[in-house]
Amino acid sequence: MNSTIPSLDPILPPIRACIFDVDGLLINSEDMYTISTNTILREYGKPDLPWNIKAQLQGRPGPEAGKIFQAWAQLPISHSEFMSKQAALQSKLFPTTAPLPGASSLLSTLSSPTTSPRPYLALATSSTTHNFKLKTSHLSSLLAPIPVTHRIRGDDPRVAAGRGKPAPDIYQLALKTINEGIREAGNGDERPVRPEECLVFEDAVPGVEAGRRAGMQVVWVPNPGLRDEYREREAEVLAGKTGEFTGEESEVGKAEEGFLGQRVRGWPSEVDDGWAVQLESLERFPYERYGLRVGEKL
């Protein structure tokens, strides 16, 4: 059952765009990462990857996650050898990924002409283009509602090196592609989507922080193991205050004006400010909370 969350907050703007993470949120590829990693750890007599370490790896670009993993695992092989072994295992595992509960229905409903207003959809994943294709090529129907031009991967050259999640850049770029599409479509009467009108869907703690730092609303859907790891710290996670990001501050939350003509409230954040909620799954999603009406007759 999904967590209990309040109805539409009149202070929060209705949602005009939804931006999704992929691994562990839409598909079960995080399980594949765990299987491949544990296989190598066991080969060298090491313990399985614990959640307190995996929590730090989730959502991050490969180089950053690799440094954290190496410092913990202390494997008697080079990083390049580890990566080679892992890639060989993942090449067999990734093509077997499957959608997580509620993912297909959510994307289908959001893109339906009977949903009003129908939000723009985008992806923002730390996965490389190569791995993204391995994980999703057999799931084309799942991702069909999301335009190819709105699918941002971790190796996109527009995301500067070292600026992956928990930095806000990848979510800012996803919004930029949405607004470029609006302009190219010639919708002269439609204003650009603002950060606070975006809803980020994440399973990882660094991803939640990235979404909050981008000045966006966030839905956090953690794996049960991750949820246990952050038990009694949920409010801190939802506020994006876990301290994952140590780079320069995003200007989005400080400079953008909100839909009420005020500074964006999304960032800097406050604990229990209502800009982020936790759900147990994507099933039975509370569309009304975000100003979305589903199943309306045309």
Image (cartoon, helix red, strand yellow):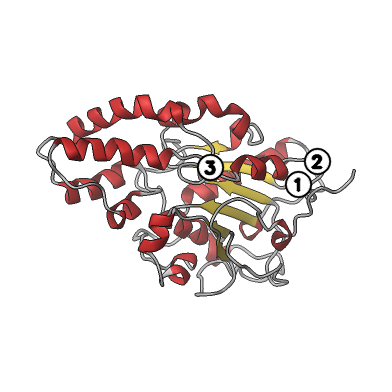
Specify the quadrant of the image occupied by residue 156: top left
Tag 3: Cα neighbours inside 10 Å, few (<14), some, or many (≥20)? some
Question: Outermost residue toward the left?
Answer: 76
Quick one: SS at disc 1? loop
Which numbered mark, 3 or 2, is in the foreground of this view? 3
Name the amino acid type tagged 3: Leu
Q: Earlier in the sequence, mark 3 or mark 1?
A: 3
Q: Is residue 100 left or right of residue 261?
A: left
Q: Earlier in the sequence, mark 2 or mark 1?
A: 2
Q: Up-down: is 197 above or below 162?
A: below
For label 2, the residue is 113
Observer able to see residue 234: yes
Give x and y (percent) for residue 291: 74, 59
Name the amino acid type tagged 2: Pro
Q: Earlier in the sequence, mark 3 or mark 2?
A: 3
Q: Up-down: is 227 above or below 178?
A: below
Question: Answer yes or no: do the residues labelled 3 and 2 have beta carbons within 8 Å?
Answer: no
Alpha carbon distance from label 3 to label 2: 24 Å
What mark, if any, has residue 142 been given in the picture? none
For label 3, the residue is 100
Give x and y (percent) for residue 3: 57, 64
For label 1, the residue is 118
Quick one: SS at disc 3? loop
Give x and y (percent) for residue 11: 69, 72
Question: Answer yes or no: do the residues labelled 2 and 1 have beta carbons within 8 Å?
Answer: yes
Alpha carbon distance from label 2 to label 1: 7 Å
Alpha carbon distance from label 3 to label 1: 23 Å
Q: Up-down: is 2 above or below 158?
A: below
Quick one: SS at disc 2? loop
Which numbered mark, 3 or 1, is in the foreground of this view? 3
Name the amino acid type tagged 1: Arg
